[in-house]
Image (cartoon, rainbow, N blue to C red):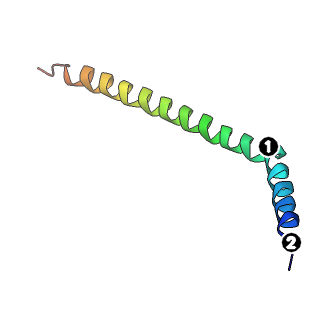
Amino acid sequence: MVPMHILFAMLNTQLARRQRDERGATAVEWVVITALVVGIATAVGVILLNLITGKANSISLD
């Protein structure tokens, strides 16, 4: 059986290695940036759709 202090040292080493690894952080940042861009584009699309629909409905066909 592995003594507890060796087990804790192994876990501490793994934790330190994962904290230094920043590859996942950049992926999360790209997901957040992409979500913001999609949200802004959707908002602009809805605003334009409402403006265009309002103008189209105000046209008199008489």
Q: Determine which of the numbered discs, if any, sits on residue 43 in the image.
A: none
Q: Is residue 13 above or below residue 43?
A: below
Which residue lies at the image location 87% right of the left edge and 59% below the top edge? 9
Callout 1, which amino acid?
A: Glu
The image position of residue 10, as x and y in percent, is 86, 62
| In the image, farthest residue toward the bottom | 1
Q: Is residue 56 above or below residue 2?
A: above
Callout 2, which amino acid?
A: Pro
Distance in Å between CA atoms under marks 2 and 1 = 31 Å
Which residue lies at the image location 61% right of the left edge and 34% below the top edge? 33
Q: Determine which of the numbered discs, if any, sits on residue 22 in the image.
A: 1
| Nearer to us in this view, 23 or 35 | 23
- Disc 2 or 1, which lies upstream in sequence? 2
Answer few, some or many: residues within 10 Å of disc 1's Cα (few below 14, many 20 plus, some between 14 and 19). few
Which residue lies at the image location 67% right of the left edge and 39% below the top edge? 30
The quarter in which the N terminus is drawn is bottom right
Residue 32 occupies quadrant: top right
The image position of residue 27, as x and y in percent, is 71, 44
Left or right relative to 52: residue 7: right
Residue 60 occupies quadrant: top left
| Nearer to us in this view, 35 or 20 | 20
Left or right relative to 9: residue 42: left
The quarter in which the C terminus is drawn is top left
User: From the viewer's perspective, is the residue at label 2 or at label 1 nearer?
Assistant: 2
Residue at image mark 2: 3
